[in-house]
Amino acid sequence: MTEFLEVEGASKTFGGVRAVDGMDIKLAEGQICGLIGPNGSGKTTLLGLLSGTYRPDRGTIKLRGQRLDGLSTHRTVQQGVARTFQTSRLFFRWPLGANLAAAAAARLLTSTGDDADGGQEKLLALVGLAGRGDVVCSSLSNAEQRLAMLAVALATRPHLLLLDEPAVGMSPAETAALGQVIQRIRGELGVTVLIVEHNMHFMMGLADRIVAMNAGRKLAEGTPAEIRGNPDVIAAYLGS
Amino acid sequence: MTEIGMYGQQETRQRVRPRPAWDYLGIALLGFGLWVLLVESNSFYSSVLATILIWTIATSGLNIIAGLGGYPSLVQGAFYGIGAYGSALAMKWGQPFWAACIEAVLAAGILGLIVGLVFSRTRGQYFAIGTMFTGLVVSLVLSNWQSLTNGLLGINVEFGFGSINQLNVVIPAAAAFSLMLVRFVSRRRLGWRLLTILEDEDLAEHIGVPTARTKLTGFVLSACVGAVAGVLIAQYNGTISPDLFDYYVGFVMFVALSVGGAGRVLGPLLGSAFIVGTPDLLNLSSGIGLLLAGIIFVVVIIVIPGGFMSAIDAVMAAASRSVRR
Amino acid sequence: MLIQAAVNGVVLGSLFALLAVGLTLTYGVMEVPNFAQAGVITLSAYAMLWLNQTAACPFWIAALGGLVVGGVVSVLTERIAYRFVRTRPLAAPVVALGLLLILDNTALILFGGDHVSLSPPYAGDVIYVGSATVPAVGVALIGTTAVALLALWLFLQRTKTGRAIRAVSQNAEAAAILGIRLERQYIVSFFISGILAGLVAFAYGPMYAVYPYMADAILLNAFVVVVLGGLGNVAGAAVCGLLLGLLESFGAIYVSAAYQNLFGFAVLLLMIVLRPAGLFTNRSRRVA
């Protein structure tokens, strides 16, 4: 049976440093998977490989059996992969609605960005920004901007959503709300989610599975409970 | 819900835009008015206006890659020159006028493709420097290629139109069409894709915009429109020489666009009118005219970064606020 | 033949290096290309001319006066114009053109457009290097460049202000956090750049002629050097200036004089595409 996401032996070297070294990951559709590891363990690079920003030096990446490795970023998006970033990235001078319209139009889902079926409102409601479509993004608060970035990624109707430290800079209340949003993304939209996060508490309550990385390699894999008790993982974090 | 519009270089205007048909009608009327001005003025003002209109075409083309896309192309002068020399030489070699035009535009498009590919990974100030020096290389090669272009002496251009009257209609019509073209492109996929690239190219790529292809298309389109302007200046002047597309022409065209309002439909018209008109019309001893022009460039770009168009916007916004009270 | 080409190359290279170093200094701190430098050179040259001929100052006093004028005018361009467009790189070409028009045409209005000669006491002398000849003004150029580069190097390496400028040039944000007052560094950089422009006027003016657009053409070559050496990299600019001078000189003699500039420009295009950060910079590029 073809897994939803299959990463086999992916490696990426930057100027002599092996950022990612022979990673294997398999995700089933509809899973929420957490990716943890100390700084420099290669998590963001792995996201970059999955989103098409980098081409793996070795190994393959397959989404529903289709090869993703080697595709440019925009083609990867066309294949149904979307990502968010560690720092808020939006078209800040534009209203939120325009951001969403651009993302939807880029997937050729609409021709000029008209919002005929009210899909924008549903998306905004899903992430908790209902009615904020006319606000210029630079005027949104930090937490709102991160949710907006999430909405923009979702507007491309992805099958796989890659989140890069989505909870950065959020208060505990905002983080909890984010967790619920991610659950709804999986539940209502059927999107598979891969989250890179440092906030262990957040991850433990949210993820179905966790993959732990260290120095570009997979250190351990399992349920949150299994990972929490894994001595190698603990050592990696304490030692780093 | 908001749709993607032409936000230009300033803050989003929240007011609802009028129906598109009005814009095109307005530009058509403008074109008609310019034609009347062109044929009714005495020969001095008429020739200044003709030059302004031809520059409008070239800078309108530039508006696509530089105004909408945000890529500071300083090489538009080279495509302008290729349009002029290409059409003139093609006619010298026996081509009928209409074919010569197409060939010149095609040549510019091919050069645009090559330059666009060469600089496909170059951005910002490096793109500016790179395109400026490309223009320099092109003009150097062509002005030294004596056998082809007769070097600094220039060549005479065969008149391709039926009559001067025809030319006088085509020039303002082409200027109007070039403005309409930008208006059209900006509302279409190419336009808003370029706008996303202007805002944040990497983010655009991450929402699925094929940035490389979009930039290239915009650049080639800009080049072709620039060539059309070149064809017309050759026809209008009757002779052309290499200083027509010296490297600084591309530079000045970019300045004209910025001062008029980059990314705005009428920006090229205002900017060209200013750049071409000020030295000619102020008619002071040449030093003072250019000195004033320099001062105005600096003041305008510092005080109204969005160019004349954004100043007009501000005035109209203030006026409509006071009307509503 | 070979020696003449080499000698010409060193003279030309010194000119490029002197010009490029002045440009790269301000490029480093504000990331805006300062085309107006040509205008500063022009006004500096005219100041020297005026002091020497109309005010009857001895040549060396006039030269000094010209340097000061260069420094002051350069600072003025920063205070009046460049200061406002630091955050808007797309406005820079417009400002640069505007300033150039202002400066060149001020010279035109004040002094007229005729080509005038600036004659130092040693003009007309010629020195022999093997079978090659080099005019004394050429030697003066080489000497000026050497002294200027040395002085600049000492300044940037050994003085507090100099080190501050290097810090700002590498990372303005970090420098500000460290307490370095950015405004002051910009002003100092522009002043030094203006002095360097004055030195160019002093060395280059006698070689050709003084007229309002005297520096516009060589500015392009200087630009090539600035990019090759890495924007903001003073040492890179100096080395690449010399290299470019030699390259163009040999190209002109052995290939074609008409296309002399072409070599430099072609190299620049190659650099922009392949290695925009310059030959010598090891500033890391932002990844994605």
Image: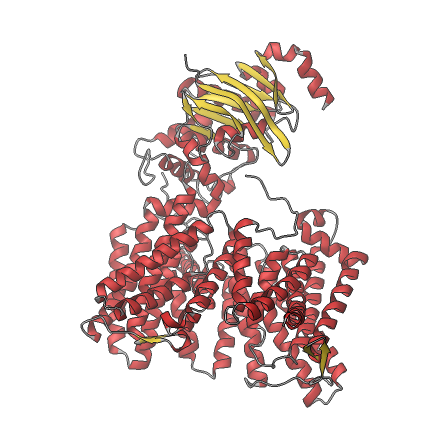
The quadrant in which the C terminus of chain B is found is: bottom left
- A240 to C70, vertically: above or below: above
Image position, residue B134 (x, y; %): 47, 60
B136, C138: nearer the viewer: C138
Residue B254 rendering spot, x and y as whole percentages: 45, 62
Quadrant assignment for the N terminus of chain B: top left
Total numbered labels placed on residues in the image: 0
Pick the residue in front: B148 or B131.
B148
Depth order, front residue of A60/B207: A60
Examine the rendered structure and indicate whether residue B120 appears above or below residue A100. Answer: below
Q: Residue at x 69, y 19 (%)?
A: A236
Q: Residue, x 30% and y 34% (percent of image)?
A: A116
Left or right relative to C211: residue A77: left
State whether residue C80 is above or below residue A162: below
Pinpoint residue C91: horizontal percent, then vertical percent: 52, 59
Which residue occupies the extreme right position in the image? C158
- Residue A34's spot in the image, x, y percent? 55, 19
**Above or below, comparing residue B244 to residue B59 in the picture:** below
Q: Is residue A97 left or right of residue B33?
A: right
* Farthest residue, direction left: B162
Q: Which residue appears at 63% of the width and 52% of the height?
A: C279
In the image, taking residue C71 as reference, residue A209 lies left or right, namely left
In which quarter of the view is residue A152 placed? top left
Q: Is residue A40 among the parts visible in the rendering?
A: yes
In the figure, residue B179 lies in which quadrant?
Answer: bottom left
Is residue A166 visible in the rendered image? The answer is no
